[in-house]
Image (cartoon, rainbow, N blue to C red):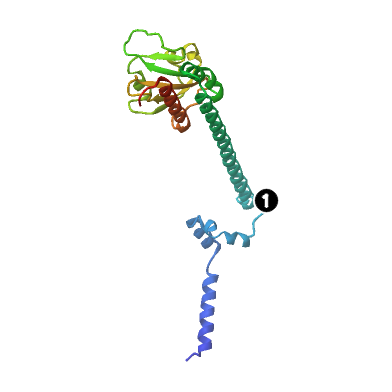
Amino acid sequence: MSSPSQDVETDAQATQAKEHLITARDVEKYLRQHADFLVQNPQVINSLEIPGKTEGRGLADLQQYMIEKLRNKLEQITRERDLVITRSHHNKLTQDRTHRAVKALISAKNFEHLIDIISTELPIIMGMDAIAIGVEQPGEADIAAPVEGISCLLPGMVDGLIGPGQPAVLRDHIQGDVCLYGTMAPLIQSDALIRLHISSTTPQAMLAFGSQRDDQFEPGQGTELIRFIGSVVENTIRTWLKLPE
């Protein structure tokens, strides 16, 4: 009968024998079956001996691979950082322009001055090539605009361009509408159309921001700031014309 100490020694020898049975092929097979092993156990990398350069056919330069992976990750982080900075600067510029536009609108001395600000000053402030107000007319006949700077639209044109019930639409790679932009129409290649709810007593209307850049406005972009400008235009027109909501 064996003693307890002999049993412990036998167990240790058996365990050691099992460990010795693990071959390089077993390790290779395991790693292939668990491709994320080093990701899940990054501390193991510190204990690995990694070749500094490729030596012979079929020998992977793991160190160079890791350096390239880190370099690619750094380049990705740099690109993402630059994109965030660019968007931040763009948002700040847009906000500043919006504040200046609102200040210009509320500084109008009368209705005619307000329309002149919209058509001449606002494009410069907002970095646009043309900004226009379009108002639907009750008939199909050509009717002179009541104030210079207001474009006359055919009935149903607001819904036709923006979409029934939609507050705004952004269009890219377009040919500008002559009825909105007049002589500037051939230059306009993208625009933002904002529905104006001036009054329950007035026909449908829109505020149009036109740009020569075909990608200045694209579907999917936010419209909050230009819609805010639209609401300021609505209220200032309503105030100067003494219209009910």
Residue at 32% of width from left, 24% of height from top? 200
Whether residue 73 is visible, yes or no, is yes
Total marks in image? 1
Residue 170 visible in the displayed image: no
Q: Position of residue 104 (x, y in %)?
A: 53, 24
SS at circle 1: loop
Q: How far across and down, in percent of the image, does residue 244 sit?
A: 35, 25
Quadrant where the C terminus lies? Answer: top left
Instruction: Give the x, y percent position of residue 18.
Output: 51, 72
Q: Amino acid at mark 1?
A: Lys
Pick the front one: 110 or 136: 110
Residue sitting farthest toward the right: 52
Against 40, residue 227 (above or below) is above
Position above or below: 91 against 53: above
Label 1 neighbour load within 10 Å: few <14, some 14-19, many 20+: few
Measured as percent of width and height from the top left, residue 130 is found at 50, 18
Q: Find disc 1 in the rendering and name its residue.
A: 53
Residue 200 higher or lower than 153, as above or below: below
Residue that appears at 61% across and 45% down: 74
Residue nearest the viewer, comparing 179 with 43? 179
Outermost residue toward the bottom in this view:
1
